Image (cartoon, rainbow, N blue to C red):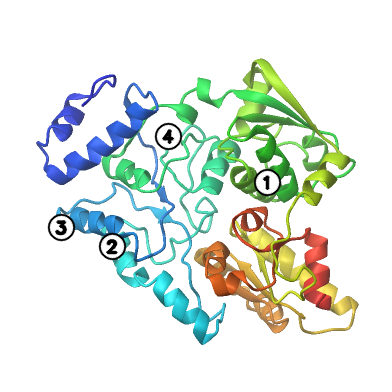
Amino acid sequence: MGNGMFLTEEEKKILDGEFGETLQKVMKTVVLYGQTFGAKRLVKLDGPVHLVTSFGIPMLTPVFEMMEELIKSNIKAREPFTVDPRPLDYRNVPVSIAKKLIFKVMYGKQKEYEVQLKAVGLKDDNAFTCACYLPEVGNIPKKGDILAWAESSAVVYANSVIGARTNRNSGIIELMSGILGKTPEFGFITDEGRKATWLVEVKTSNLPNPQVLGSAIGMKVVEDVPYIIGLDKFLGLGLSDDTKDYLKDMGAASASNGAVGLYHVENITPEAVEMGRNLLVDGYKSYIIDDEEIKRVINSYPVMWKNINAKPKLCFIGCPHLSINQLYFWTERIIKALENIGQKKLKITTILCAPPDVIDAFKRDEKTYNKLIQTGAKITYICPLMYMNNPLCANEAVITNSNKLRTYSTARFYLDDEILERIVRGY
């Protein structure tokens, strides 16, 4: 079973079943996964895992059965972990009775599944977010830390902005790794796997929208590693809070419009600051992104609405989840835009999505929070994609500034300024 992979004596004993049949299955799963990708050994994790499977879809029976077996064997992750967002929040994202009935079928096992997650090591009731690395949430790796995460937008952020090391693991593999405290050594965990095979040059006249830039990069390089130059001209050197937010959204788009798990940005991301263009392999490919290319990419997005001229019913902002910095940014812009036209309420129902811990922190600023809520905007902890998976919701005219949500649903993409104009004026 361990053929082609070096296993320590303890790992061999686990694989041979000396610590019980259930833990043996866990080890067998992780070893087979490693062998598939040519890993020579398992390496120790330096931090908690982050799970992608956060929703109780009844058809995931094998997952629920596996979780029950782990619980009965008293097996859990070695460190408290975080998990992707919950799918439902009827208080802040109200739905019709018909939609609620479909959601009941779609996510009917949610409560039971959350009990299972807690039993195998979920951090707490607030640990549901795709942006687990935000300070308020606390699953924050350090540069060089070896991880096993499985949410694409979190993986690309951890690898790129933080400089930690994790592969884009499949759902459940990350939990298995968290239980063992080990993950197979291949891909982004290795020095060689972190080298860039593309030089992407940003030559736009202004800072491009991060969602569109990420989309362009993802569609071009697919799963390769890009080394991006030209952004420091707009963003400055190093990592400010604004730059982190920009890279968060850019990375999420590159990971969903392509399959990017790591990027380097010259003079900004930690490994690029440290190693510069030495990160580029010999014979790298080149891609220039100018104003025309940005325009071409935006024009390539299909409109999935049945009625292309429909009036938007709903707007989602925050996929991936917003940081507290972004909540303040959108609150200020919404209030100012309404004041400019002498209006108090938004014309389109607008939902801002953020981690529960970030929402709690924002609510502590009662004055600002109340000002936002008075506009009619709502703040939720859900994943908007989970909402859009309901066929009745998918039939609605939903707008978003998220390229990830656009890619995986029928939501229509608009740039931030266009979104603001529509939610304020209603067209």
Residue type highlighted by circle 2: Gln
For disc 3, the marked residue is 72
* Whole-percent x, y for residue 324 in the image: 63, 61
Mark 3 is on which residue type?
A: Lys
Q: Secondary structure at mark 1?
A: helix
User: What percent of the width, then of the height, locates residue 54?
Assistant: 41, 60
Residue 280 position (above or below residue 133): above
* Whole-number angstrom distance, CA of label 3 to CA of label 4: 29 Å
Query: Is disc 3 placed on a helix, strand or loop?
Result: helix
- Residue to which mark 2 is pinned: 116
**Residue under pointer 1:** 250
Q: Nearer the viewer, residue 406 or 184?
A: 406
Dot 3 or dot 4: first in sequence order is 3
Question: Going from the N terminus, do you reach mark 1 or mark 3 first?
Answer: 3
Q: Nearer the viewer, residue 171 or 372?
A: 171
Which residue corresponds to mark 4? 146
Residue 64, by quadrant, is bottom left
Residue 353 placement, left or right of 286: left
Give neighbour class at mark 3: few <14, some 14-19, many 20+ (Cα, 10 Å).
few
Regarding mark 4 in the picture, which secondary structure is present there?
loop
Q: Earlier in the sequence, mark 2 or mark 3?
A: 3
Q: Residue at x 36, y 29 (%)?
A: 36
Q: Is residue 230 above or below residue 57?
A: above
